[in-house]
Image (cartoon, rainbow, N blue to C red):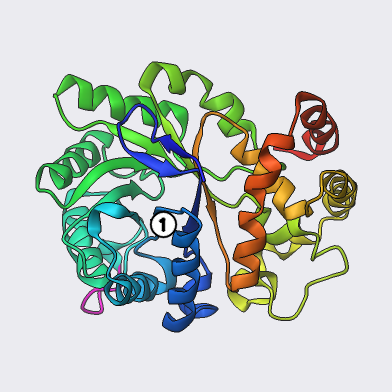
Amino acid sequence: MQYRRLGRSGLQVSELSLGSWVTYHTQVDTGAAVELMAAARDAGVNFFDNAEVYALGRSEEIMGQVFKQLAWPRHSYVVSTKFYWGLAREGNTVNFQNTLNRKYLMQAIDGSLKRLQLDFVDLVYCHRPDPNTPIEETVWAMSDMISQGKALYWGTSEWSAADIRAAWEIAERHHLHKPVMEQPQYHLFHRRRVEQEYARLYEDLGLGLTTWSPLASGLLTGKYRQGVPEGSRGSLESMNWMREQLLDPARNAAVGELEAIARELGGTVAQLAIAWVNKNPRVSTVILGASKLAQLQDNLGALALTPKLTPEVMARIDAISTPLAR
């Protein structure tokens, strides 16, 4: 496992990390989470990603129980959470959802810390942009969160380049803590934002990336080429919205071509897809998702494939995937 700086910060995160979206609570209980997180750490993973909204807070609770049970030294791992969608509080969801206003943010961090059983999180994200709250209000709240010692670095997730730059410039102007990282979706079929829209931000602002969905929610494992398997993420009722994407005929045909390249390199198509994201020097860490130990171990095998992605191999991969990317 190699470690990379989170953008221009001094924090180093493992090139592969482990997230809990969808899986924790819905597919993974505390016992399985202990097994997965322990195996990830044994492989060198030091970053564990979460969010307030995952399983409506239950994901943070499970991860917090794992941290307590495994009793790792706090300095040895990095943990994140994200805020935007909110949770129902005292039966009132109207004023605490889809917002990044100061009131919500300052209360949200306290709730996450309680669920995670931590004194602070290392990274905290604005999970989506909020068009109804001035960016300046959000920047002040996030900076204050860090000044209060409840988080160490803050960033964004799925924000436009223009909004990220605006937030950074507001922080610069008022001598506040600046956004350090962005968490975008990034995989072979979803690449324009990372490769084109954000291109100027890496050098101008020192932006780091903690990317999610390297396997396109499972599409790039090849398991959806014959339909939706029982027990897969695509079979979950809450994931109905992504089934059309998972069953896309053109992309599944491309996955078949990518599988041939992976076999030549001695790996699986999932490992190839993760290695491809990992190969991008702008990516600080690739967030993996796993519901079973064997799945996690297979994904970690991408580390052995990354050095095999020569310019010639990358060109072959791009020829297959770029025409289908957005």
For image coordinates 58% across by 72% down, the residue present is: 291
Q: Main secondary structure of the magenta part?
A: loop
In the rendered image, is residue 83 in sight?
no
Amino acid at pointer 1: Asp
Q: Where is 153 relative to 301, above or below? A: above
For image coordinates 24% across by 58% down, the residue present is: 74
Image spot of residue 188 (x, y percent):
71, 41
* Segment tinted magenta in the rendering: 88-93
Which residue in the structure is indicated by mark 1? 49
Image spot of residue 61 (x, y percent):
32, 75
Q: Is residue 143 magenta?
A: no
Neighbourhood count class around disc 1 (C-alpha, 10 Å): few under 14, some 14–19, many 20 upward: many
Q: Left or right: where does residue 86 sit relative to residue 172?
A: right
Q: Left or right: where does residue 285 sit relative to residue 165?
A: right
Q: Where is 286 relative to 293, above or below? A: above
For image coordinates 38% across by 73% down, the residue present is: 56
- Observer-nearest residue: 191 or 170? 191
Q: Where is 324 relative to 86, above or below? A: above
- Observer-nearest residue: 50 or 128? 50
